[in-house]
Amino acid sequence: MQFDYVIVGGGSAGAVLANRLSANPQTRVCLLEAGGRGDSLLVRMPAAVVAMLPGRPKINNWAFETAPQPGLNGRKGYQPRGRALGGSSAINAMLYVRGQQQDYDSWAELGCNGWDWDSVLPYFKRSENNERGADDLHGDAGPLQVSDQKEERPITRAFVDAAIQMQHRHTEDFNRGDNEGVGLYQVTQFHDRVRNGERCSAAAACLFPVMHRPNLTVITGAHAQRLVLDGKRATGVIYRQGGKGPNLKVAAAREVLVCGGALKSPQLLMLSGIGDPEILMQHGITVRHDLPGVGQNLQDHLDFTLAYKSKDTDNFGIGPVGSLKLLGHLWRWRKNGVSMAATPFAEGAAFLKTTPDLDRPDIQLHFTIALVDDHARKLHMGYGYSCHVCKLRPESRGTVSLHSADPEAPPCIDPNFLSDPRDLDTMIKGARITRAIMQAPALAPYRHKEMFGTETAQSDADWEHHIRARADTIYHPVGTCKMGVDDMAVVSPDLRVRGMDGLRVVDASIMPALISGNTNAPTMMIAEKAADMILSTA
């Protein structure tokens, strides 16, 4: 089979590219996705993410593990990543967050011309169909439906009030380039009459509406094995259907577009002989292109959770009263899309500064209407709530490498959490700020018991003990095929793999530095901008 463009990965970036590139009926586009369609009830119902996120069993989820982390007492971290059309947007909390203006301006300062805030803002707007309508910073005609929450819990409003009581300002919109404050997240959720309250994954937004196009071929269950290279030019992809059977080949007349995400994209490049020669030769892989930055520069948001037991049953928990209420919520959601079944779980938002002299917030809070322990892999009887805190711009850098030359093996993921002591310092400050909010009067009616021993934490050493014992990712890995102009850059500012022809990487792996927030909306923006760059050179 031959196409103009072959896209590897049908996640948040791949879905956008498939839509935009196939809009011209003369352009032949093929999309390869290792997972399934990503359109089941578990995906469409937001609250059903609790069945997919833990990875037990692996439903629409790669459910990777990290290497043991010295900074986390030698624990292996958990890295859930979406395995379906829509990618991680099919299993995430649907939070629509762009990051800070300074994040993108700093990319431009690193040599990534055309990636400053003013340059990327039009692509955010192009992507967006915001329930609040269009203005100078928002769009209302894009494929991605962005909504206010359908029915946030009263306890979430109490969290916002508690933060205000602690002198943090209220913010209505976390997507105007200055996110400091506390409020409610907007979410990637349908607000039309037909699908109101359903998850609007990247596939639901961009891919499913155009699957009928005769010039677009979508192949699910197609696990890419390696790229086909003719010298320094990518000409196709070898894939395997359903994890077994013979290798199949699809050819690209113009470009191969790698959209596997920060963990899978560098793995595919290395399996194809593109990367650090020393690493490739360790696994018996023939070096086709010396590019030492592949798999380097891994950055992720380390997250620490404060959790509380509550006697309030008007949230998620395990017990007879709440279970009966949940049945009612499920019925209401099926009827009109409005109920607790539409929750993103992480309803409350805060972007705060740990010291007032900072130019932008350095911590983010996610207030969740459930007692969260180990990514919902450890369950507790009863009811509760949690608040996550993460450092927005970590100093620690990790790697993605290979366990072996077997394409079916998971990548070797080493975030190297807390390897830079500055990250621990910020996390301790953030935990103190978060606990002060959680102890504020507005939350007193809901507060029954603080969990995991943090109620006795007083000194920095106490907080360090808790953070090293329980912290882990909040699912924002980036940077492993970084964009730039230095020797360790993998792609240039037009996202072409340096030194190669016919090959680009388009996903969160190209971010030179992690943005100050959730990464799904920025990944879709990257793909929108990439589509313009690709079409302008076709």
Image (spheres, rainbow, N blue to C red):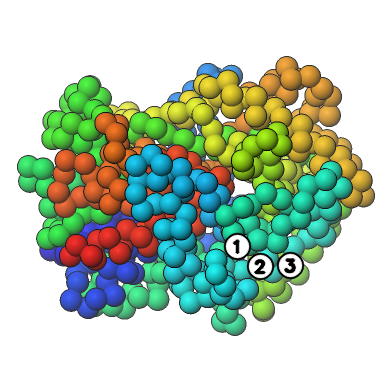
Judging depth in this view, the residue of 426 and 267 nearest the camera is: 426
User: Could you tell me which residue is drawn at 74 percent across and 63 percent down?
Assistant: 152
Q: Quadrant of the N terminus?
A: bottom left
Q: Position of residue 262 (x, y in %)?
A: 39, 42
Distance CA(mark 3)–CA(mark 1): 12 Å
- Of mark 2 and mark 1, the one earlier in the sequence is 2
Q: Are marks 2 and 1 in contact (CB under 8 Å)?
A: yes
Q: Is residue 135 visible?
A: yes
Q: Which mark is residue 151?
A: 3
Residue bearing mark 2: 148
Q: Is residue 245 visible?
A: no
User: Could you tell me which residue is drawn at 19 percent across and 70 percent down?
Assistant: 28
List the single residue furthest toward the bottom: 193
Question: As shown in the figure, which amino acid type bears the numbered disc 1?
Answer: Val
Q: For mark 3, give the secondary structure.
A: loop
Q: In front: mark 3 or mark 1?
A: 1
Count residues near mark 3 (Cα–Cα under 10 Å), then give few for <14, some for 14-19, many for 20+: some
Question: As shown in the figure, which amino acid type bears the numbered disc 2?
Answer: Asp
Question: As shown in the figure, which amino acid type bears the numbered disc 3?
Answer: Glu
Distance CA(mark 2)–CA(mark 1): 6 Å
Q: In front: mark 2 or mark 3?
A: 2
Q: Position of residue 362 (x, y in %)?
A: 62, 38
Q: Is residue 538 left or right of residue 123?
A: left
Q: Which mark is residue 6?
A: none
Distance CA(mark 2)–CA(mark 3): 9 Å
| Residue 332 vertical position relative to residue 258 in the rendered view, above or below | below
Q: For mark 1, give the secondary structure.
A: loop
Judging depth in this view, the residue of 459 and 534 nearest the camera is: 534
Q: Quadrant of the C terminus?
A: bottom left
Residue bearing mark 1: 187
**Rendered image quadrant of residue 401:** top left
- Of mark 3 and mark 1, the one earlier in the sequence is 3
